[in-house]
Every structure is written in structure tokens, then in C-alpha cells.
Amino acid sequence: MVYVAIGIVAVVVLFFVTSYNGFVRLRQRTREAFSTMDVYLKQRYDLIPNIVETVKGYASHEKETLERVVQARNRAVNAQSMEDIRESNDMLTAGLRQIFALSESYPDLKANTNFLDLQNQLSRVEGEIAQSRKYYNAVVREYNTRCEVFPHVLVAGLFNFSKEMYFEVDDATQRENVRVSF
């Protein structure tokens, strides 16, 4: 009888240890995934001033649009919480759409090699951001699932492992088809 009790205690302790370690590993993967995405977001932020300066030379009377983009960029750079990062990046994406829509009205800008190069760099970075968002959200899904399934929910509650936020698109205009012309 004593051996059965010791065996049960050992199994319970082993479960808690492995479950706890699993949470720690997933939390670290979530942080690593966010850091990767954050690197690409910072690359995006670094391109914005160059794009704005290039557009200024051709569309100086579009000052309000350019200022909104710079403000959105600054807000995104200074965002701390996941919610602020998501919101500020939605605003920034909307502003960039406006800038690229402006290029349609200015044929000289649209043909400018510097602008085209910046546009290509931004397109590449946007692709990297999209891939890193997918990875981040996949890791968050795995972590959040573990936080909710029994019996891991017991360990999550006991050691304060709480669900993480997904990096989602909140701005409905980002779901619309983008018109691309060359």
C-alpha cells in the first residue's frame, strides 16, 4: 500500500514538473517569436522616414497625409503592450496605403528609382512580418491551448500562466483587396 501511495505521488509530481517545464518552454518560444516579428517591425519603421522624405519631394502639398504616417510610425515605435503594437501597426499600414495611393497621382514619383527601391524593400519586409506573425500566432495558439486543456489548466492556474494575445488584423481596410499597378 505504501508503494502505491509513493507511486501515485511520484506520478503527480512528475506530471507537475513536466507540465510546468512545458509551459516555460512555450512561453519562451512565444517571446522568441514576438522578438523575431519585432525585428521586422523595426525594419519597417526604419523605412518609413525614407519613404516620407522621397514622397515629400514630389507631393509637398500632401503634408497632412505624410504627417499622419510619421505620427503612426512614432506611435508604433513607442508602443509597449501587444494591443498598442497591433493598433499602431494598423494605423501605420493604413497610412502607407495612402502614401502608395498618392504615388498613382504623381507619375514622376511612381517612376522614381529611389521610391521604387524603397517600395520593394518595404514589400520584402511586409512579407517577413507576415511570416513572423504566422509563426508567432502558431506558438501562441499552442501555448493558449495548453493553458486551457485539462489537466494542464491546473498547472497554469497554480503557476499563473495566462493566455497570450494573438497578433491580429483589427482594421477592416487591411482585409480588402489591394490594387497593384505597374
Image (tube, rainbow, N blue to C red):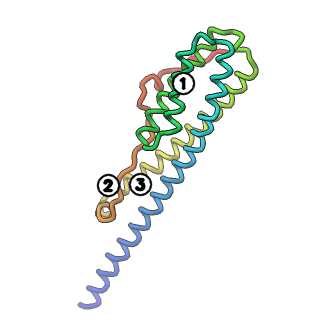
Whichever of labels 1 and 2 marks the residue nearer the N terminus, that label is: 1
Q: Which residue is mark 3?
A: 143
Number of other residues with Cα within 10 Å of mark 1, as a class: few under 14, some 14 to 19, many 20 or more: many
Other residues around mark 2 within 10 Å, as few (<14) / some (14–19) / many (≥20): some
Viewer-nearest residue: 41 or 24: 41
Q: Are circles 3 and 2 on residues that touch, CB within 8 Å?
A: no
Amino acid of disc 1? Val
Q: Is residue 173 left or right of residue 109?
A: left
Name the one closer to the observer, 25 or 41: 41
- Is 11 drawn above or below residue 94 in the view shown? below
- Where is 61 relative to 38, above or below? above
Read off the residue under disc 1.
69
Q: Identity of the amino acid at label 3?
A: Tyr
What residue is drawn where x is 47% and y is 30%? 90
- The nearer-to-camera label among 1 and 3 is 1
Name which quarter of the figure residue 179 lies in.
top right
46 lies above or below 137: above
Q: As shown in the figure, which amino acid type bears the numbered disc 2?
A: Glu
Circles 1 and 3 in contact, beta carbons < 8 Å: no
Lower position in the chain sequence, tag 3 or tag 2:
3
Q: Where is residue 24 drawn, in percent x and y? A: 44, 63
